[in-house]
Amino acid sequence: MRSTDPDRLRLLAAQGSRGRTSSLQPLLTEKEEPKRPGTLDLRGRLDAELDQITKHLATLTRAKDQLQGLLEAVMAIGRDLELPAVLHSIVTTAMDLVGARYGALGVLHESGEYLKQFIAIGLSEQERADLAEAEFPRGHGVLGHMIDHPEPLRVNDIASHPASAGFPPGHPCLRTLLGVVISVHGEIYGNLYLSERHDGQPFDANDEDIVVALASAAGVAIENARLYEQIRESAERFQRLLLPTLPDLRPFTAAAVYRPATAPGSLGGDWYDAMMLPDGTCTVVIGDVAGHDLHAAAAMASTRNMLRALLYDRHTSPGGILARLDRTLDAITDNPVTTACVARIEPQADDWILRWSSAGHLPPLLVTPDRRAKYLYAEPGLPLAVDTEQRRPNHSHRLPAGATVVFFTDGLIEHPDHTLDRGLKALAENAIAHAELPLDDFVQAMASHHPSDAHDDMAILVLRTPHNA
């Protein structure tokens, strides 16, 4: 038997081992690891779950943003006090909360049977032009359905709703609708309508919930605005009761206007007065008591009545009248600081002469027949209730026939963003622009085009000399 060389055997074994490794390696690298049964199904389910979670998170994020927007919206609509502004804010806020392109608010008639007002937001200028000839919406079709069934309504296809009556010519073709009822003190005030989300999706339950919540806040805001209007109207009526009706001042013509401040319940101290004295002189007064409350209004009434008594049947200079008034008020009242201007207009040769004295009041504005305007600047003196010993200077100025003299209070020209000189200049320009108007129209134009911010009440008394002295 032949013997085997151990070293040769080891070499052959090593070569055989390397050869086997080399031949098997490609099979191991090219062939993928076998997958377990159901792996593909599991991954599909996981992807679907992740998609659902992503959508859910997006919904939660949108709901969170809507809730935050709702809180801000409630604060925003509560800041408005004028009813038209409140109604407009309700619609635009609801549109923002749910991302609607169109919004409207229909206010019900007192009978509750149809709409008496319809505020539409979101229409383009072209769409509004297309609807110019359309009949005012009274609450037919789906809108009428909400009047008959006062509850939230979500419609994904308006045309297919049983109550749908179509759209008038020129109306945008709307598909989706979300409507909720607005109630005030348990009574239906109107309906809020939203249409067409910007993302193209129909309105969902979350949209409905958020708009219903807004509608509750809207009812409170509407009630506050209505109360504000009632208070303002009552204050204005009370104020007007304290002001006189201008008497017959012939041969002069006169007109006056009073406008209350825009602040709610703000009683003012502005007043005007005019009378013919027994000697044939025309006397006019303009004044402003400091403050915006009942005390100011009462002080105004007592000052006006006292001044009337001092003016009548006394041929005293305007400065003398103011001095006497100041001493009397100081002795028997605690009235606040008051500015006033007392003026007398008397005939002189072929024209007229204006004599006046001011207790810290703004100067009269003279508008001549040739439409030139100038302020009659003169020493104003101190307001009433400051120093009763102060001298009250008198001033005079010739008035041509057909001249217009404007007496006014500072509420007509004051603006926090403008200087007083700017307000006076704007008032003079306004007077020139409307100088040709009849006096009643002239004074209304002066009040309507004032340069102030309307934070204060305003009084204007305008007197025009006859064209022939």
Image (spheres, helix red, strand yellow):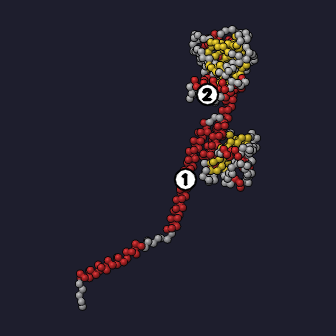
Image mark for residue 58: 1
- Identified by mark 2, the residue type is Ser
Q: Which of the two discs, 1 and 2, sits closer to the camera? A: 2
> Does 282 appear above or below 3?
above
229 or 361: which is nearer to us? 361
Q: Secondary structure at mark 1?
A: helix
- Residue 72 location (% of width, % of height): 57, 41
The count of marks equals 2
Tell me the quarter of the picture where residue 132 sits. top right
- Identified by mark 1, the residue type is Ala
Residue annotated with mark 2: 452
* Residue at far top of view: 315
- Residue 459 location (% of width, % of height): 66, 23
- Residue 15 location (% of width, % of height): 30, 79
181 or 128: which is nearer to us? 128
Dot 1 or dot 2, earlier in sequence: 1
Rate crowding at label 2 as few (under 14), some (14 to 19) or many (20 or more) other CA atoms within 10 Å: many
What quarter of the picture does the C terminus occupy? top right
